Amino acid sequence: MLIMTLIIVAVLFIGFVLMSTEQMHHINRATVAMVCGVIAWVIYLLNGEDFVFLMHGADYKAFLAGDVSTSDSLKYFVAEKVITKYIAEACSVILFLIATNTIVEVLHNNGVFDSLIDWLRMRNSRVFLWVVSLLTFAISANVDNLTTVVLMMSIISQVVRNHHQRIIYACTIMIAACLGGCFTAIGDITSVMLWVREAITPSAYAAGLFLPAFVSLCVFNLLISKKLHGRVEIYSALSRYDGDDSYLASWQKVLLLVVGIGGLWFIPSFHYITKLPPFLGSLSVLALTWAVEGLCNLERNGNVLLVQRHYFRNTEFIGMRIILYFIGISLGVGAFAECGALDFVGNWLEENVNNVYIYGLAVGAFSSVMDNVPLMMACMNMFQVDMVEGSTSEFVQNGTYWQLLSFCCACGGSLLFVGSMAGQAVLEVENIRFKWYIRHYLWRALVAWLVGLAVFWLTH
């Protein structure tokens, strides 16, 4: 059993390295995640009986109902009772992200964000930095940070003409999106995972992380603003024509914005009232947004004249890559957990370290060179949520560990491009040199994280 466990760990480790170095070998990380996830479960089945009795002994005996364990019964149990838990969690997060991503695309295609392009046409480079970063921070609190980065990159590409200035603002957008996404339950894949796992509740989570995240952003802006001098080189004003002279009225755009973004903020209340999974609330908001969009576009009758704007990369392709990547990661981390490796690491840490701030620093360091999504999943499965009422453990719902985990994953993932999908998107869009980013941005992002971590410690 030990040999099989080590083989599974080795396969997943190689996979994590390949996913983090996608820019070097150009192998799609979704491909790596799916291949490694399937291989890990095949290896798991080779020694499946030992693993099942180790982790699910009582459940397996109940499943057998007095029969003798066979190869087929073991495979059926793993397929029906073990692997489905990880697939179900992955699908809950994926459906949530599909709905929120589509809501933003509907708003974008109807010109809801066009006014931002005109509003951001300002000349003062430092004021522009603060406005763009705070706007990104606010938007990322409502939708996942990859969608926010793609949206904001699309906007500044229509405003900032100078490429050097644009990459400075693009890197700032990436940092602001990671920090804004980490302090709400709906702002990032990692926080959505914590919410689905019931490790956090939206209100307490936001209250605990807003100040550290906001302070980190302010510190970063103060450090980076010293690099900015002169005026922003912006494009001259251009009139827009979308193929149809019946633009949506301003009140219709405001209505869509209120329904879309306001609906996203209602999702936690929907979950609290109904106790239904969060993705059902996001799907309901999407349906309502589509209905309002249809009413606002009655004059176009749903024909092809309805403008279809595009981000830098087709959002459907981004969404499909995220779906496949997330499923592959869920399978791989699931196999990692089911072979007992994560329990072993968690027990060792509790016995020899037993300090959540050391865990946070380690997670932040690892997430700077390793994709923070699989790292977050592994850390979530390493410890169980303490559901004992009145417990003072740091692993209770809304405990210090879960909030610190999310904050450090977000900050660590923004230290280097390889640590987050938002960073990868910025790197690909603006073709930023890795050495340039390390020289100009790494130490500033690190200082901002450590200051935010100090604020977290003082407030907790």
Image (cartoon, helix red, strand yellow):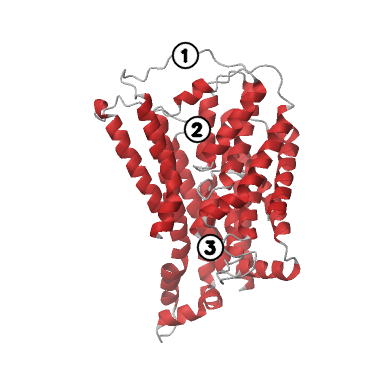
Q: Residues within 10 Å of mark 1 (few under 14, many from 20)?
A: few
Cα distance in 3D space between marks 2 and 1: 20 Å
Mark 2, secondary structure of its residue: helix
Picture mark count: 3
Mark 1, secondary structure of its residue: loop
| Residue 447 position by quadrant | top right
- Residue 107 in sight: yes
Residue 431 position in % (x across, y down): 61, 29
Label drawn at residue 255: none
Label drawn at residue 151: 2
Q: Residues within 10 Å of mark 2 (few under 14, many from 20)?
A: many
Image quarter (top left, top right, bottom left or bottom right) of the N terminus: bottom right
Mark 3, secondary structure of its residue: helix
Residue 104 position in % (x across, y down): 43, 37
Label drawn at residue 238: 1
Mark nearer the N terminus (2 vs 1):
2
In the image: residue 425, left or right of residue 84? right
Cα distance in 3D space between marks 3 and 1: 52 Å
Rendered residue at 60%/44% (across/down)? 420
Rendered residue at 71%/28% (across/down)? 225
Cα distance in 3D space between marks 2 and 3: 32 Å
Badge nearest the viewer, 2 or 3: 2
Q: Which residue is mark 3?
A: 334
Rendered residue at 63%/33% (across/down)? 172
